[in-house]
Amino acid sequence: MNIAKTKPASAGPVKQRMDVLLLLVTMMLIGMGIVTVFDASYALAIETRHNDAFYFVKRQALFGGIGALAMVLTAYIPFWRWRRNAFPAVCVSVILLIAVFVPHIGHSLNGARRWLGVGPFQFQPSELAKLTLVIYLAQICSAGPKIMRNFKLGVLPPLIVMAVVCGLIAKEPDLGTAIVLCGTGLVMLFVAGARPKYMGGVLGVVGVIVTGYVFSKQYRMDRMTAFLNPKADQFNNGYQVWHALLALGSGGLAGVGLGEGREKFFLPMAPTDFIFAVIAEEWGMIGTMALLIVFTLLAARGYSIAHGTKDPFGALLAVGLTTLVCLQSVINIAVATSSIPNTGVPLPFISYGGSSLVLNMIGIGILLNISKYPEGRGKPEERAVSPGEEAFERRWDRAPYAPRVTPDTLTAYSREASRLTRGAEIDRRRPRTGPAPRRVDRAKKRHLTVDRDE
């Protein structure tokens, strides 16, 4: 019995050069963020951190260094390895989000319980949940468009996980992060092949839930009122938005100059949620347009990586990570320009915050690795080896004792092949008046003989 052997069609993953432009854009944003954090926070640091004007910028630079190491590490970890640990990572994130509400474990600030940690080193589990949820959604949505078109099998399971994670984050309360995660997840579901009618229904349900959530607390309704007319309540609920608009208007075309802005002394959360207003005042319209161009380049490179990746998991992961950064940027800038109500979302790579900076840089590291392996894992496909190929390989394995092929034998083989072909063509053209004649395989009855003197 002949058993067909198999051999790999490819040797493994095909590596190419990582996306250098994405790396340069990210480092540019981080450098811009460190400069702006110092500019926006030195007065607050002198007042609250024992006259240490460099307190916040030193911490930001420290977390930037940690993030750089993490980015380099994740850039060299094959992205398909994240797939096997996607669900356990989400479970860990959910446990940490629950731990935030446990007394003496979770820490609160300004009425929100969002932090875990000891002393000055604190960590936001919601930032980890962003990354782990995107990885999990990429893993579960890469099953294929056929499954994603089925609501029960393809759409409902990721929606349940999204609802749990976003619900815990909104409970902290942190509505802005919950909206960012929900929007990112819906984009990934749509790209994965979910039907538009399902997405429309989900968007309607999410809209109703968000509306009810906003009107469930008085301070959220006050924020909505301040958004509609910030000048009418500029000394109370509209204070932040009003001073952000003053900063935008004071900047003009070229800005008042680095370090010369005044509204940063009046803006609460100037180094975090409203750092775009500080940039607009000191760098002007030219600086803000340059910042928008840099973020646009980052988005273009991220989606280009997703488009060029053949692996479904890698493509969806690239879409999720890029959308995560883009949504945060859009919401932060929209709040600073009073285009939407205040939600408390930081500007990626720019705003002060160690957890956000490190985990965003880890996401960029994963994107860089996806750009290195556009073909994906490159798992070898098994193909059958023909008997002739196997015999040929065995022949040359036995060289030099194997019989050699000479020009004379090649000529004889070609003549015999031509003769057999002509005979088969004549038999095919011959009309048949009766039953088909019995054909005898002449190759079985006689051996191939070649007259070398022909």
Image (cartoon, helix red, strand yellow):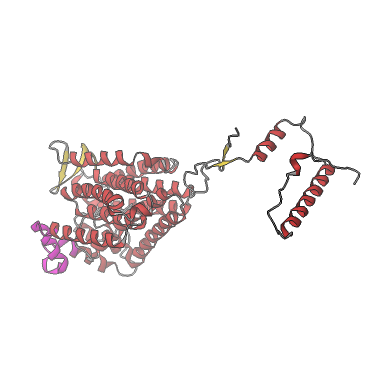
Identify the main secondary structure in magenta: helix
Residue 234 magenta-drawn?
yes
Give percent across and percent down for residue 306: 42, 54
Q: Quadrant of residue 289?
A: bottom left
On the rendered structure, is 139 left or right of 221?
right
Please state the extent of the stretch shown in magenta in the rendering. 214-241
Residue 159 visible? The answer is yes
Residue in the picture at 41% in, 49% down: 314
Q: Nearer the viewer, residue 355 or 281?
A: 355
Above or below for 406 versus 325: above
Give percent across and percent down for residue 41: 25, 51
Q: Nearer the viewer, residue 55 or 318?
A: 318
Single out the residue that lies furthest toward the left. Answer: 218
Single out the residue that lies furthest toward the front. Answer: 434
Give the quadrant of the N terminus: top right
Above or below for 16 versus 253: above
Above or below for 166 versus 288: above
